[in-house]
Every structure is written in structure tokens, then in C-alpha cells.
Amino acid sequence: MQLRKYAPSGAALVASLLAAPQLASAFYLPGVAPTSYKPGDLVPLYVNAIRPVAAPDALLHSVVSYDYYHPLFQFCKPKDGPESVGESLGSILFGDRIKTSPFELKMKHNETCKSLCEVTYQKGASFFVNQRIKSGVALNWLVDGLPAGQKIHDELTDTDFYNPGFLLGQETQHNQIMFNNHYNIFVEYHEVNGNRDQLRVVGVLVEPESKKYNGIVGPDTCRQVMEPVVLDENGETKVQFTYSVYWLPSTTAWATRWDKYLHVFDPKIHWFSLINSAIIVVFLVLTVMSVLVRALKKDIARYNRLDQISLDDLSGTSALEDGVQEDSGWKLVHGDVFRTPSHPLLLSVFLGNGAQLFVMTGFTIVFALLGFLSPSNRGSLGTIVVLLYTVLGFVGGYASARVYKSMQGEKWKLNIILTPLLVPGIVFSTFFLLDLFLWAKQSSGAVPFTTMLVIILIWFIISVPLSCAGSWLGFRAPMIEAPVRTNQIPRQIPPTTTYLKPLPSMLLVGILPFGAIFVELYFIMSSIWFSKIYYMFGFLFLCYGLMIITCAAVTVLMVYFLLCAENYNWQWRAFLAAGTSAGYIFLNALIYWVSKLSLGGLAGSVLYIGYSLLISFLFFILTGSIGFFSSWWFVRKIYSSIKID
Ligand SMILES: *[C@@H]1O[C@H](CO)[C@@H](O)[C@H](O)[C@H]1NC(C)=O
């Protein structure tokens, strides 16, 4: 597998400069430069949110995550209480809650069975923890920025890899719920150029154990075989927390320390299906396009020839010739194709936001390909997305204004105001409502109030003014003139065949762009819901390209058929038909829900459906806009190549 090389420090500098202005000092991009330690130096161990996980091929039972220091878990705290570690905005949005911990890891000092603290679990707490163990949650620790993982062997490729996180406890065959209170921490270190004073952390594994200690804990206690700790739901349980640290020399260099974490379960299948779909898509698009171009050339030649004939003998038989000429085809609707569609304001606002999303997605994927978004840059994906969306408000405003002007819209003030507010407003309020659910569940996944405030500030102080500036420029720019004049009186639209009716055509058009990204979608879903690290940006780039091509090609084809059937209401039809692929994405999410997740409780389901709806909505705007803009280009092209008197 070809792995991306990690961000060179120059690139990292640019990234932090980009991030600097509005993210203030509380946010930064950590984990880019290597840290070297001397023997005996304290290596920080940070704790992150406790998240539900599922073993490969198992069902996920929950999507609610918890803070490590949630009062019912009662994990040992540092002496002066836990402190939050500075995180980037994207990292917070994606659910990281990194805090300090009481663990003391001294570089190259092995320690066994160090006692941490003793805790008494009451009935309620025991019940809560046991429920979490049953739903399979994992602790997430970070040592020197590396996630502590468990080693997993992949039979298929016969390789070992590190899966971030380790279990809070496990259920035995006899339905006994064991709670892990001892942690064996294995830290791999690498000597830089054989220098014994320059040691770097290159791998972290944790093997948790459940040990019911009787009496005093000493360095040798952990070697003894002991009964597991079971939290009593009908009484009190005393639990002693301990840990051991083992330092293992490693040949892995710092630059490649993430490779073990980035595991593809079946790279061959991944490649195979991608190439497969790419070939099908390219073949289909090429065939369709060549047929379409040939038909168009014929049409145009015929129209222009007929034009010539009718010009040649203006005298006698022109009435008859006219009858032949205007007989059929898309030329008939030339006086109506550029008629303003219904609700031009809403359409232009959607299209502006679609253009913004389109450019943002493109830039994000390019950034990812350049290595900005390596997993060592925690949360960089989220940060970049928010940043780009904010700055590209300008593009949104400009596109929206130009489209609206060309549709002869008159409520230009409303257009300027709605473009930066409508779609982001829908997204933000859905996000906020889902956040309320998480708050109610006391989940750490709830985005803190201060972060919400930062987002609102970024939105109103940077994005809205930029969008307005874009709109202003867009309205000042000359109007995009239609190549043919629009008649005063609209034509009657004849009844159409079944497959050109709105719903069937939408369903037919929408499925192809969805098909182009279907494979990648699976991996993205599992990285979102199973907290797997996603890094296959090369695949993503290809898929995005395929999706754009398919989306444009199929919509253009539909618009051609529509015009041939003398239906000139192509604007909304193109937008909605291309946007239907988002419906398939939502459907796919529902199938995933049924087959891979088993979320007990209302909150989990609401969250899952809510987030899926949100993503589908954005996708709807994006693909709809791709469909519209390509159709617009197509319609302008064909009508400017025929002569109309
Ligand atoms: C620490 O313990 C591990 C495992 O027992 C051993 O391989 C390693 O050499 C030890 N390291 C040191 C510095 O003693």
C-alpha cells in the first residue's frame, strides 16, 4: 500500500499560519514536529474521550461517547485535577476531549505494578460501567500524540497492525462482566541515529487486565494469577487501579510511526472495486457522450440547413418549409428554455452554496493529497473544512448573485442575505439540536458551548461579510445573457413518456453518481462510526472526479431528452435529478444502520439518522449544483450554435 508522506514542516507552518487568525491561541495544530526524550524524561500520557468500538465484523452498539473523567467511571485523576489539553477546532468538532492523566511514564524506565488509586463503586456507578462494557466501549489514550492501541492480526494479509483504543472491560462466556483495572503499557522507542540521549516514541500498545487484588500491591503482585474484578450492581465494590510500563527498543523511524495504524483490511478488493467502477463509469460516459454529440451535430446541421432553405425561397413555399422545420426536436422550445424558473431565489441560493461546497471539497482533497491531513495532525480535516468553507463564502455569494441576476431576479437584497444564512443555518441548527441530545446523554461528543460560540463568530464575522462581498461583485458583473430571446407567452408542454416524468427521471439520474462513490462511501462510513483512521485520499480524489463526471454527464443527457420532449423546465429538474444521489446516500446509510449497527435506545438512533440526514443534505446541494451548472453550460452551448430568426 502506498502511504502518503507526512506533512513537511514547511507545509505545517503554512497550515498553522492559515489556522492562526481566527482560532486564537486556544487552538493550534499539534503533533507535527517530533519530540526527543532523554532516558528518565517524563513522557506525557493524555486521555481522550471513551468511545464505542466494535470488533471487525461485529455490530456497533452505540454512538454515544463519554468524557474520560465522567463522574460515574471514577477513573483516577492527577493530583491537581485533570486539565484540558489545547486542541484544534476540527479535533473538538470531531469529538476529541484530551485531558491530562496521573500516569507517569519515564523514558526507558520499566516499572511494574505501580499503584494509582483505590476507588469504591456504588450500585449506580457499577450498573453504568457494566452497561458501557456490554456495549463495548474503548479507552483512548495518547502517548506523545500516538494513540494507544491493541495489536490485531489480519489473517487475510498476514500482517499485524495497531487498532487505536483498548476495551474498558469484557464479557465472559458465563455472562460475567470483567472490569479492567490494570494496564500493561508497552511503549516502543527509537534511538535517533543510535544516539542514546535522543529517544522518540514510535509505538504504543496497551494490554488491559482485570485483577482482584487482596491487600497491599507491590512490584511483584502483578505476576500472580488473580480473579477478575466484577462490579457488583447490588452493593459496593472496591477497585485498586494499577499499571506497568515496558519500554521496548524499535527500529521504526519516527517518520513512519503511523504506518502500523493505517491498515487496509483488504486492499486488493478496494482497488479492484474502484478500478471496476471507474472503467464502467468512463465507458458509460464516453458511449453516452459520443451518441449525444453525434445526435446534436445532426440536429444542428438539420436546423441550419432548413434555415438556409427557408431563407433561399422566401417567396412561395416557405409556409410548408416552416412546418417541416419547426416540426420536432429541442429547437422548438428556443423561446422558453431561458425562461425564469419558478422560485429563482431559492434555486440561486442553493446553487451558490453548492458552488461553495464544490470548491471546498476539491481544495480539501487536494490538501489531503499534499499530506496536510495526516492522522498525526489531529483534527486537521475538521479544521481545514471549517476554514475553507468560511473563506469560500466569497465564491458562494458570487455564484449565487450571478445565477440570480441571469434569471432576472429582482429581490437582490434577499439573495445577498439568504446565501450565507439559509444553508449554513439549516446545517447549524440541525447540528445544535443533535448536540442537545448529546448533552442530555451527558456524552462528551456534545460540542462545548465555547466552541459553538467560536463557530458562530467565524460564521458571522468572516463568512457572511465575505459572501456579501462576493454577492456585490456578482451583481456588478455583467449579466450572463441568454443566447436566444425568450417569448412573451409560454409554450404548452406536451405530455411526456413515463421515464421523463419527474420521479422516474430523478431516480434514474441519481443512481449513477451514487454508484461512482459507493465503494468509498463504505470506508468513509466505517471511519466515521467505527472511529477507524481514514487516509485513502488518493481513492477519494479519484472517486470525487468520477462522481463529478457521472453527475454532469447523466444530467446533461436527461436535459437533452427533456428538451427533445419539448419540456423546457430544465433548471429545477436538473438540480433535483442530480441531487437525488443524496437520497441514495441516505438510503445506503439506512441499510448500514440495519446491517452494521445495533443501536439500542432512542438517542443513538436519533443521532445516527440526524447526522446521516445532515450529510445527505449537503451532498444534495453539492450534486444538484454540479448537475445544474453542467446542464446550464450544455443548454447555452446548443442554443448558441443554431440560428434563430
Ligand atoms: C523493559 O521490559 C521489556 C519487557 O520485559 C524488555 O524487553 C526491555 O528490555 C526492558 N527495558 C529496559 C530499559 O529495561
Image: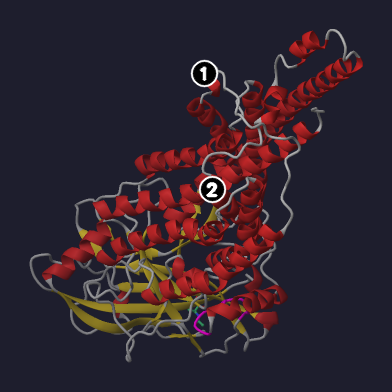
At mark 1, the secondary structure is helix
State which region is magenta.
25-34
> Is residue 515 rendered to the left or right of residue 193?
left
Q: Which image quadrant for residue 269?
A: top right
| Image spot of residue 408 (x, y percent) | 63, 47
Crowding around mark 2 (Cα neighbors within 10 Å: few <14, some 14 to 19, many 20+) is: many
> Is residue 241 rendered to the left or right of residue 309?
left
**Alpha carbon of mark 1 to alpha carbon of mark 2: how far?**
26 Å
Under mark 1, the amino acid is Thr
At mark 2, the secondary structure is helix
SS majority, magenta: loop
Q: Which image quadrant for residue 370?
A: bottom right
Residue 598 in view:
yes
User: Ligand 1 near label 2 (Cβ, under 8 Å)?
Assistant: no
Crowding around mark 1 (Cα neighbors within 10 Å: few <14, some 14 to 19, many 20+) is: few
Query: On residue 498, which mark appears?
Result: 1
N-terminal of the two: label 1 or label 2? 1
| Image spot of residue 212 (x, y percent) | 21, 72
